[in-house]
């Protein structure tokens, strides 16, 4: 009988190894080939032992992104199928542009449109708002303007998400997060920066598909970078304008990313469990989207930091000299701040915001709570002593009052570092129980705990 | 076509019709295998993750053109992965077809320390280095068999070769890998 080829025996043993059989058991089956087989099987077992598995975080994030790409692709195909034939007729293109302009002018000028501008997803006029957005996009004359509009729409979606989180409508949050991510993707695509969904240029994308399938068209085409366009180098003036456009886009993108991601992150503290899941998805996907876009437009991508220092304050709002104070921090409320209700002095509020170098908080959102504030709250804070003003010490932006019983260790003076333990009064002033003043010149490592909810320096990288 | 193939084909049909859930299903079924396949080619880590993600995006673009025709979906998907890893190496300007004769005698581990080499590879410390020294076809056969868990029959379909040729290639690949790991020319 002819001897069985070693390749066949090896293959059989490999199958057995993968099914859980030991090397020794395989060798025992083929004693005549054992000497030759053994080193091969032991080497092969290194590969089975490698147990390469994707990181769970990657697996999940990549899945979200893939699902986003699936939705985008489906919409694009639907749009192409529905309009391709009609739009191919020149007279239709001319008339449709004019008709759309008239329609949008009509809608933009109507009371319905004005009323719909602030509508939320659970309100009747919301579809009008979304229609107007689509019309604005259709009429935007250039890619740059469409990119800018998509970024602003992303801001709007975050604003709506905040409103839906406050009212506990988790399903709306989930729908909105999909729209949010789509807007970010579209902004990136329109701005001509390379997309995460089409990381490779078009030619690369076509090569990626196997020969058994027709060569696919890249879904998202990447505009060549300056100097890489077909037909030779880009004239200097053109390159400069591209660079300038990219820089402007980068700056705008970074500001918006900082703001929106901080809001999504901080909102989790107020969200229901279901809404938290949706917020998590929104955060993960938006962060990935913003990060990709920033990476594509930044010359130093490693410096892209998407989450600035932020804080969450929960205390009664205090109005003093035309300024808002919450938990002893000065809170700057701008027209961009998302406020659910009118801020009223004495009402309990939750403020999510960005920490400024001067200790003030730039409010991203303010949620005015229905519940009554607790009479006082125990707090511990530490920071630089700034000054004594109107009988109150300003320590790391907190106003601190010393009572007769307050124990002070060390000499309290401007420039010193102090650790304060006390209670937060209704007016936002900290009544100190104990103050420990550091004797050293430099500050100790800073980890404030102004309120129980404080999340200062909570950075995600 | 067995029951499992039928099942996959049904999911693929739904995906081709634009069913989002079907795409998620395909992702869940294949992401680990695709990653392992890619990681055995380019080494575990960020590159393998990027390529894995790209495989699914390419799949999304090209799935409309997929037809059964005797090629299992897994093999088709891994062809995308293969093409992307080839592109990766091309971009890296790394010789993807270093012949065994060119491999320097410098060993990754001593020939008396096979156990050490097991730890070495199982810890994924330098799997990339070892795999890099194989020919492209050798890497592919090992990645398909041990990364993507394909049978010889499936591997043959994915590589467009017959089963006998795959077994010979597999044998040569393992022998070469051993030589590289032990740093000595056998025979």
Image (spheres, rainbow, N blue to C red):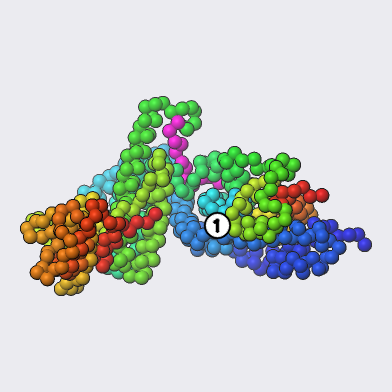
**Front in this rendered view, residue A360 or A294:** A360
Q: Residue at x 44, y 38 (%)?
A: A223
**Front in this rendered view, residue A460 or A400:** A400
Q: Residue at x 49, y 28 (%)?
A: A231
Compared to residue A319, the image places residue B126 above or below, namely: above
| Rendering coords of residue B75 (x, y %) | 65, 55
Compared to residue A215, the image places residue A130 above or below, namely: below
| Rendering coords of residue B103 (x, y %) | 70, 43
Instruction: Name the chain under label 1.
Output: B
The magenta span reads A216-227
Find numbered disc 1 in the image and state the secondary structure of the residue it sits on: helix
* Name of the residue lying farthest toward the right: A1
Q: Which residue was labeled with disc 1?
A: B16
Q: Residue at x 33, y 47 (%)?
A: A254
| Rendering coords of residue A371 (x, y %) | 19, 73
**Quarter of the image containing the N terminus of chain A?**
bottom right
**Quarter of the image containing the C terminus of chain A?**
bottom left
**Front in this rendered view, residue A166 or A280:** A280
Compared to residue A151, the image places residue A278 above or below, namely: below
Q: Residue at x 44, y 36 (%)?
A: A225
Query: Is A190 situated left or right of B32 in this image?
Result: left
Does residue A449 belong to the magenta stretch? no
Query: Is B59 situated left or right of B172 in this image?
Result: left
Q: Quadrant of residue B164?
A: bottom right
| Rendering coords of residue B101 (x, y %) | 74, 42
Q: Quadrant of residue B2?
A: bottom right
């Amino acid at each position: 009988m002819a001897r069985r080829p070693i390749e066949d025996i090896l293959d059989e043993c490999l199958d057995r190894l993968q099914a859980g059989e030991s090397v020794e058991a395989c060798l025992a089956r083929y004693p005549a080939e054992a000497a030759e087989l053994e080193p091969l099987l032991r080497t092969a077992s290194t590969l089975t032992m490698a147990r390469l598995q994707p990181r769970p975080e990657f697996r999940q994030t990549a899945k979200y992104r893939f699902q986003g790409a699936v939705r985008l692709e489906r919409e694009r195909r639907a749009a192409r199928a529905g309009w391709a034939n009609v739009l191919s007729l020149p007279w239709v293109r001319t008339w449709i542009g004019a008709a759309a302009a008239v329609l949008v002018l009509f809608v933009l000028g109507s009371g319905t449109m004005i009323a719909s501008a602030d509508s939320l997803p659970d309100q009747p006029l919301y579809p009008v708002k979304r229609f107007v957005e689509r019309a604005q996009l259709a009429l935007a004359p250039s890619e740059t303007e469409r990119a800018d509009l998509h970024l602003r729409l992303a801001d709007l979606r975050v604003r709506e998400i905040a409103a839906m989180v406050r009212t506990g409508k988790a399903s709306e949050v989930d729908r909105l997060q999909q729209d949010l991510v789509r807007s970010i993707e579209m902004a990136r695509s329109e701005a001509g920066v390379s997309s995460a969904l089409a990381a490779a240029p078009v030619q690369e994308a076509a090569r990626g598909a196997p020969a058994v399938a027709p060569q696919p068209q890249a879904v998202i085409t990447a505009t060549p970078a300056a100097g890489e366009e077909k037909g030779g180098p880009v004239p200097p003036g053109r390159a400069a304008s591209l660079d300038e456009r990219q820089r402007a886009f980068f700056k705008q993108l970074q500001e918006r990313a900082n703001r929106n991601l901080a809001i999504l992150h901080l909102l989790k503290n107020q969200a229901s469990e279901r809404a938290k899941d949706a917020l998590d998805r929104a955060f993960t996907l938006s962060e990935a989207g913003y990060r990709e876009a920033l990476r594509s437009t930044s010359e130093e991508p490693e410096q892209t930091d998407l989450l600035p220092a932020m804080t969450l304050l929960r205390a009664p709002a205090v109005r003093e000299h035309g300024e808002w104070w919450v938990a002893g921090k000065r809170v700057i409320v701008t027209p961009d701040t998302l406020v659910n209700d009118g801020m009223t002095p004495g009402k309990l509020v939750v403020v999510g915001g960005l920490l400024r170098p001067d200790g003030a908080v730039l409010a991203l959102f303010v949620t005015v709570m229905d519940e009554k504030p607790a009479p006082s709250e125990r707090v511990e804070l530490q920071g630089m002593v700034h000054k004594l003003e109107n009988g109150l010490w300003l320590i790391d932006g907190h106003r601190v009052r010393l009572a007769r019983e307050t124990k002070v260790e060390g000499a309290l003076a401007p420039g010193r570092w102090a650790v304060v333990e006390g209670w937060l009064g209704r007016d936002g002033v900290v009544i100190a129980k104990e103050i420990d003043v550091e004797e050293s010149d430099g500050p100790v490592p800073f980890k404030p705990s102004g309120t129980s909810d404080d999340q200062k320096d909570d950075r995600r990288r | 076509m067995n029951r499992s193939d039928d099942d996959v084909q049904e999911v693929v049909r739904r995906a081709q019709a634009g069913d989002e859930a079907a795409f998620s299903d395909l992702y869940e079924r294949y992401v680990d295998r695709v990653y392992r396949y890619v990681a055995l080619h380019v080494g575990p880590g960020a590159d393998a993750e990027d390529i894995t993600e790209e495989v699914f995006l390419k799949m999304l673009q090209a799935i409309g053109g997929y037809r059964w025709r005797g090629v299992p979906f897994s093999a088709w998907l891994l062809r995308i992965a293969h093409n992307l890893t080839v592109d990766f190496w091309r971009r890296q300007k790394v010789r993807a077809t270093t012949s065994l004769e060119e491999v320097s005698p410098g060993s990754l581990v001593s020939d008396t320390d096979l156990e050490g080499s097991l730890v070495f590879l199982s810890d994924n410390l330098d799997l990339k280095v070892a795999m890099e020294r194989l020919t492209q076809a050798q890497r592919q056969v090992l990645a398909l068999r041990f990364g993507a868990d394909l049978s010889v029959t499936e591997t043959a379909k994915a590589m467009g070769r017959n089963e006998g040729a795959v077994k010979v290639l597999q044998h040569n690949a393992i022998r070469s890998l051993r030589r590289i790991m032990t740093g000595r020319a056998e025979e």
